[in-house]
Image (cartoon, helix red, strand yellow):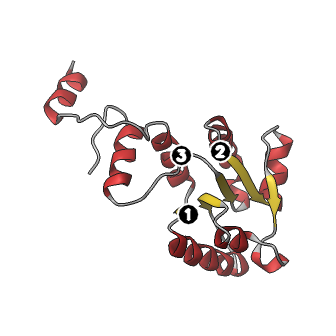
Amino acid sequence: MGVGASFGEAFAKATLAAGTVLPRGGKVLISVRDQDKQGALEVARQLAGLGFELVGTRGTARLLHEIGVPCQATNKVAEGRPHVVDLIKNDEIALIINTTEGKLAIADSFAIRREALNRKVTYTTTLAGARATVLALQYIDASGVNRLQDLHQEFDA
């Protein structure tokens, strides 16, 4: 359980308690299905604002470039090497945001998840999870202890 004055702080603490290490920097792999692309734009902007470098599959990278967010393009697994799994194997990726649909994308996603687990790379498969992770990254250094009684008084006031 994570307790904080905000959702981001609480999620950061819960993530830490669960043994998941949130990165403090590095490259974020973003590969999202078409219906999530618009929602991923704000997540990508926030990650870039936090100092992360972005790497995306071609469709995602192209959309990010169109809105002025720098993003390096990389291949999907089926598109040949070097591809997203190679980047993970080479320890180049610190965080992964990957939503999928369709047989080919789901097969690629399995390879990405397996290598992320092997390398202990933080990974989210939903846009909601990506948003929560970005909020948590803003509180990554929050170490204060929050008493539930104090938080209840704040909310009741």
Instruction: Quickly name the residue at label 2.
Output: 52
Identify the residue at horizontal 38%, vertical 38% (top origin).
9
Mark 2: amino acid: Phe
At a point 69% along the width and 73% down the height, the residue shown is 85
Quadrant containing the C terminus is: top left
Label 1 Cα crowd, 10 Å radius (few <14 / some 14-19 / many 20+): some
- Quarter of the view holding residue 65: top right
81 lies above or below 26:
below
Label 3 SS? loop
Q: Few, some or many C-alpha atoms within 10 Å of disc 3 (few <14, some 14-19, many ≥20)? A: some
**Picture quarter containing residue 95?**
bottom right
Callout 1: helix, strand or loop? loop
Q: Which mark is residue 125?
A: 1
> Label 3 sits on what residue type?
Arg
Front one among 114 and 62: 114
**Three-letter code for the amino acid on which mark 1 is drawn:** Thr
Q: Secondary structure at mark 2?
A: loop
Image position of 54 with respect to 33: above or below: above
Question: Where's residue 106, x and y in %?
Answer: 65, 77
> Residue at the top extreme?
157
Taking depth in this image into account, of 71 and 23 the one nearest to the observer is 23
* Mark before the other along the chain sequence, 1 or 3: 3
Q: Position of residue 113 (x, y in %)?
A: 57, 73
Give the residue at mark 3.
24
Query: Which is more N-terminal, label 2 or label 3?
Result: 3
Distance from the alpha carbon under mark 1 to that under mark 3? 20 Å
Mark 3 → mark 2, Cα distance in angstroms:
8 Å
